Amino acid sequence: EPEVTQTPSHQVTQMGQEVILRCVPISNHLYFYWYRQILGQKVEFLVSFYNNEISEKSEIFDDQFSVERPDGSNFTLKIRSTKLEDSAMYFCASREDHSQPQHFGDGTRLSIL
Amino acid sequence: TQLLEQSPQFLSIQEGENLTVYCNSSSVFSSLQWYRQEPGEGPVLLVTVVTGGEVKKLKRLTFQFGDARKDSSLHITAAQPGDTGLYLCAGEKGGTSYGKLTFGQGTILTVHP
């Protein structure tokens, strides 16, 4: 069964550094999402992306965050200048259309030191 | 802010017992998903409910969507140790918020042999 794949599984970065989290959505999916889960807290929506533009973003997704679909297969989340509070699991999800459910990757654990 | 209150947060039962997990909100959702999440992995979809009053069964799991589409429940009959895990509900609103999932806090279920 096709899967959403995320790399790396664990990223350790110094505070203030830029980080790029990578996702390969399921190949025929058109809608892409990023969520995060701080340890012990709820999964939180960050951003949705369709047709090469952001559809919706949460208040968490400030100007330090950006997303990109640089080619036909990758979907990336960039954090420009990381903060300690960015430490979390980041999940990518994709779906074929609005009638279908979102499929999640296994996440990238981001640790900011 | 849409909130999904999931209860209980923790559930520890003996094999063979029945249990129910609840997901409640003051908001109406166009659909509600139930996911199961294993440690180190992303949420895996169990079921999507769309219609008010809808009931779906998945083996020993029964999912119900409230008539007003504001609440949902997951009932497990004759729980087994293999049911142990984290269960998440997530609601999706329609319109311009299509795709944005609002998650509950999760229920950590432990089934003892």
Image (tube, rainbow, N blue to C red):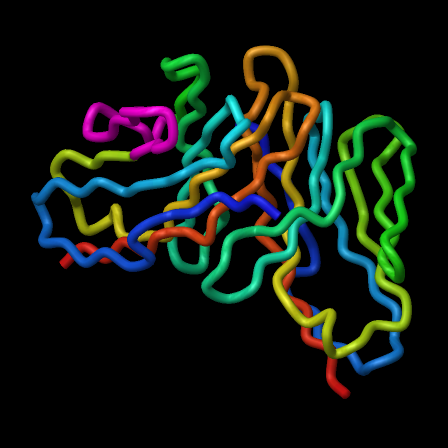
* Lateral position of residue B100 relative to residue B89, left or right: left
Residue range of the region highlighted in magenta in the rendering = A59-76
Location of residue B45 with respect to A32 vertically, above or below: below
Identify which residue is drawn at 68% across, 69% down.
B109
Please give the name of the residue rendered at 90% of the width and 66% of the height, measured from the top-left corner. B77
Pinpoint residue B85: horizontal percent, then vertical percent: 64, 67
Q: Is residue A2 left or right of residue A14?
A: right
Residue B111 highlighted magenta (yes or no): no
Residue at horizontal 8%, vertical 44%?
Answer: A16
Between residue A57 and residue B48, name the one nearer to us.
B48
> Is any atom of residue A23 visible in this view?
yes
Residue A65, image quadrant: top left
In-front residue for pair B4/B85: B85
Query: In the figure, residue B78 lies in which quadrant?
Result: bottom right
- In the rendered structure, the answer to whether residue B18 lies left or right of residue A11 reads right
Q: Is residue B28 visible?
A: no
Residue A67 included in the magenta stretch of the image: yes
